[in-house]
Amino acid sequence: MAPTLYDEKPEPGDLIEIFRGSYQHWAIYVGDGFVVHLAPPSEVASAGSSSLMSVLSEKAIVKRDELWDVVGTDRWEINNILDKEYKPRPVHDIVREACSAIGQELPYCVFRGNCEHFVTELRYGKAKSRQVQKAGEVVMMAGVATILGLGVVALAGALFGSSKKENKNNQ
């Protein structure tokens, strides 16, 4: 069940992570029950925005919506993920910059400019995405596994192939 306002009380400048199945949507809390977030132009305020639309969009709009309209029934949490790595910018700067971006259309790229990049840049001055980092690690591990698998097949072929040639030569 998603937390209620009484379970978790965000402070202005907090990062809000919203769990939407296979991906997370990110927003930044700006106070009075509102968040600012980067979303595809076709997305309505209600939760459950299509991840497919996010992937296919090349542009996104900075929106200000009520936290509960963005979260809907999804699970969410305050997640200031980089506080141990970077010092957060002053709250008034975060909120001012977030609010001044409302309505802007920005380039959108799942790998270089998604909603998580947007909010981490506001909070820390560094555009980072843990989702992209994790996806890159998965791709890298899959590549290593493929190379190792091909290496094993090649080694097996060399070993068994050479023994067959030796058997033919001995006959």
Image (cartoon, helix red, strand yellow):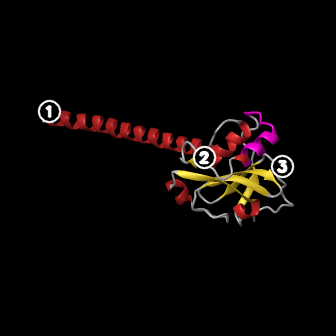
Mark closest to the chain's N terminus, 1 or 3: 3
| Residue that protrudes farthest toward the right in the picture | 6
Residue 36 image point, x, y percent: 71, 52
- Is 90 covered by the magenta stretch? yes
Q: Which residue is mark 2?
A: 131
Report the residue at 46% width, 38% height from top: 144
Magenta residue check for 97: yes
- Give me the residue at 72% from left, 64% from top: 69
Magenta stretch, residue numbers: 85-99
Residue 141 placement, left or right of 91: left
Which residue is identified by label 1?
169
Mark 3 residue type: Glu
Disc 1 residue type? Asn
Q: In x, y percent, where is residue 86?
A: 73, 33
The residue labelled by disc 3 is: 11
Q: Is residue 90 left or right of residue 116?
A: right
Image vertical order of residue 37 relative to residue 123, above or below: below
Determine whether the residue tagged by mark 2 lies in a helix, strand or loop. Answer: helix
**Cβ–Cβ below 8 Å for labels 1 and 3?**
no
